[in-house]
Amino acid sequence: MVKPCWKPSVEGDGGAGRGGDTRGRVDGLMWYKDLGVHVNGEFSMAIIQANSLMEDQSQLESGPLSSLESGPYGTFVGVYDGHGGPETSCFVNKTLFSNLKKFATEHQEISADVIKKAFLKTDEEFLSLVKQQWFEKPQLASVGSCCLVGVICNGLLYIANAGDSRVVLGRTEKASRGVTAIQLSVEHNANNESVRDELRSLHPQDSQIVLLKHKVWRVKGIIQVSKSIGDAYLKRAEFNQAPLLAKFRLPESFSKPILSAEPSIFIHRLTSKDQFLIFGSDGLWEHLSNQEAVDIVNSQPRNVSIQSLVI
């Protein structure tokens, strides 16, 4: 049940850390790494296989963020929540960070523009793969992945999100004498009124750009997220036809992409009050509020806190 394809990528790990391990462990349907070391501190990771086919990936890279000897150096975190199959999340896991390093080398820095270019280039490359394999594997056109990335570099935290995963910061506050949860990402889910308003403004001629089905808002009545990597059938009209399965095809063609891969980006300067970050897909946040998750992490030993969230 645990496939090499979805084993999280952990590069640049400086060692096992206190009570941790280098490669991670498997416990039934859960893969986890208790504690590891990265350039900016410590981390732990965990994934649980919820479906018969594992569609999700996670990634941590620590060290050089470009090919330049002078840097920049930092930490890259990625959470890739796949849907329709594992192909897109696996592709993002193998491709996005290398694209980030490419653009960081060209620009000689980490910036919001560099991260955005890495997202768009990764999406472009996956859509090219869909085109290459269109007649052999047309189902690739209906596979996609939400993409949440965090980059820590030079005291700055960059959060980039395309989809409905979420990152929450735990910050100490003197007034509350505890750790307060602060959400740092914007979610692109049609259940959010702001997302529906944005889609309607982008597609004023399409009265059915968002539809309410079974009490859930969906883009074109099909998918909840408005941004993703992949989902070629909702980005290029050339894939809105056979041999793609009829259930994915729209009754009408379209002249502009319905979904976007451009992430929303937030930049935060880290301070001594910032204690930890929680990166998670929507499967976590459907069951826990931001503050509940922060309280769990804050109350547990560092080497088992992530397991406490997912078990």
Image (tube, rainbow, N blue to C red):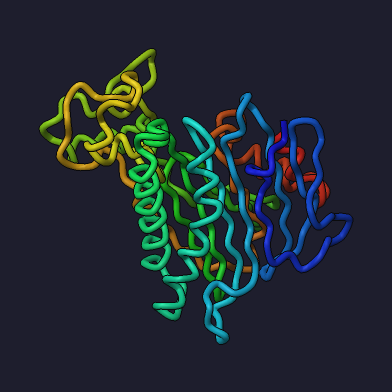
Q: Is residue 232 above or below residue 120?
A: above
Horizontal and vertical percent position of residue 170: 63, 52
Left of 285 or right of it: where is 243? left
Residue 22 falls in which quadrant of the image? bottom right
Tell me what residue is drawn at x 43 percent, y 58 percent.
Answer: 266
Furthest residue in direction left, as rendered: 205
Quick check: can you spot residue 302?
no
Horizontal and vertical percent position of residue 236: 25, 40
Residue 293 falls in which quadrant of the image? top right
Left of 213 or right of it: where is 185? right
Left of 60 or right of it: where is 250? left
Tell me what residue is drawn at x 75 percent, y 64 percent.
Answer: 37
Horizontal and vertical percent position of residue 178: 69, 50
Q: Is residue 307 above or below residue 267?
A: above
Horizontal and vertical percent position of residue 84: 47, 30
**Quadrant of the image containing the C terminus:** top right
Residue 35 falls in which quadrant of the image? bottom right
Left of 45 or right of it: where is 200? left
Furthest residue in direction top, as rendered: 214
Q: How many marks?
A: 0
Quick check: can you spot residue 42?
yes
Name the foreground residue: 123 vs 180: 123
Furthest residue in direction front, as rendered: 136
Q: Is residue 238 above or below residue 116?
A: above
**Quadrant of the image containing the N terminus:** top right
Tell me what residue is drawn at x 38 percent, y 53 percent.
Answer: 125
